[in-house]
């Protein structure tokens, strides 16, 4: 029993150390960037505009041009400018091509009352091949495409939603604050903010923060995300109210 406990303690210590190192690196690189004071940040504009929650977009049903359900969203690719670039969807289980993964640019995706609609058909599915646009997805062994979340790597300057969701969130000098529970996007695909679910040490609440990605020391390979704020800053935050946020994909 003591051996298992020691292993768990060691694992937590290593994880905490790694998170602290990543946070310090992000903090150092961010010093030359502009960080928005939390005193100038509030949720009113986000509430008024509404948008799309990452957890609603992931696994959303995908419909074709004839309103037939053809698959589901597997992942979402976001640019270093914090805009959705494309969705990765698994489609075509009933087509002759069988199950296949396609990459659909965001400008070709329409919000549907039950999910999203794309111009992908049995005849043109090959035109949306996952590896046809190398600026979005790095070339991989095609046998690995069935594990989109873990194995398909985004191209340079592009990251997947699953690279950030559920990562640790830190404040100050690598202090564990909580984890990334969600990401908010506008209808146009711009990141509105990240949702942090805080740990018991910070009151176990839900808060939205500006997103600081590329250029602020963060990269998709990190397991920790530095919020860019200190303990004193976050202590003044109000809880984010999902009830006031109209999710355009939420029934």
Image: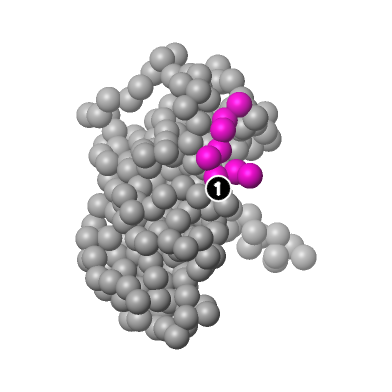
Seen from this angle, which residue lies furthest right?
1
Visible residue check, residue 196? no
State the residue at coordinates (65%, 30%).
243
Query: What secondary structure is found at the residue carrying circle 1?
Result: loop
- Quadrant of the image containing the N terminus: bottom right
Q: Magenta span has 231?
A: no
Q: Judge by depth and name the residue closer to the eye, 177 or 104.
A: 104
Q: Residues within 10 Å of mark 1 (few under 14, many from 20)?
A: few
Q: Magenta span has 248?
A: yes
Q: Which residue is mark 1?
A: 113
Q: Quadrant of residue 156?
A: bottom left
Place of residue 145 in the rendered image (x, y in percent of width and height, measured from the top left) = 41, 75
Where are the magenta residues, as a range? 244-251
Q: Is residue 126 above or below residue 163?
A: below
Seen from this angle, which residue lies furthest bottom?
96
Place of residue 78 in the rendered image (x, y in percent of width and height, measured from the top left) = 34, 50
State the residue at coordinates (22%, 29%).
32
Q: Judge by depth and name the residue closer to the eye, 87 or 179.
A: 87
Q: Quadrant of residue 215?
A: top left
Place of residue 116 in the rendered image (x, y in percent of width and height, measured from the top left) = 48, 54
State the residue at coordinates (47%, 27%).
49
């Amino acid at each position: 029993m003591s051996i298992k406990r020691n292993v768990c303690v060691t694992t937590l210590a290593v994880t905490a150390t790694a998170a602290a190192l990543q946070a310090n690196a992000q903090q150092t690189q961010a010093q030359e960037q502009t960080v928005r004071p939390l005193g100038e940040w509030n949720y009113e504009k986000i509430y008024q505009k509404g948008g799309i929650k990452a957890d609603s977009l992931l696994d959303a049903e995908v419909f074709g041009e004839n309103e037939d359900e053809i698959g589901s969203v597997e992942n979402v690719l976001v640019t270093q400018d914090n805009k959705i670039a494309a969705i990765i969807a698994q489609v075509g289980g009933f087509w002759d091509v069988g199950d296949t993964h396609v990459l659909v640019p965001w400008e070709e995706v329409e919000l549907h009352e039950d999910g999203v609609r794309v111009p992908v058909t049995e005849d043109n599915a090959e035109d949306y091949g996952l590896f046809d646009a190398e600026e979005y997805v790095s070339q991989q062994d095609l046998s690995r495409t069935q594990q989109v979340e873990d194995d398909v790597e985004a191209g340079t300057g592009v990251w997947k939603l699953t690279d950030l969701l559920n990562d640790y969130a830190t404040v100050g000098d690598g202090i564990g604050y909580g984890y990334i529970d969600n990401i908010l996007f506008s209808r146009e695909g711009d990141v509105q903010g990240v949702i942090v679910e805080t740990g018991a040490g910070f009151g176990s609440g839900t808060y939205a923060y500006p997103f600081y990605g590329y250029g602020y020391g963060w990269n998709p390979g990190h397991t920790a995300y530095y919020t860019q704020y200190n303990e004193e800053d976050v202590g003044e935050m109000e809880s984010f109210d999902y009830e006031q946020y109209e999710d355009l994909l939420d029934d």
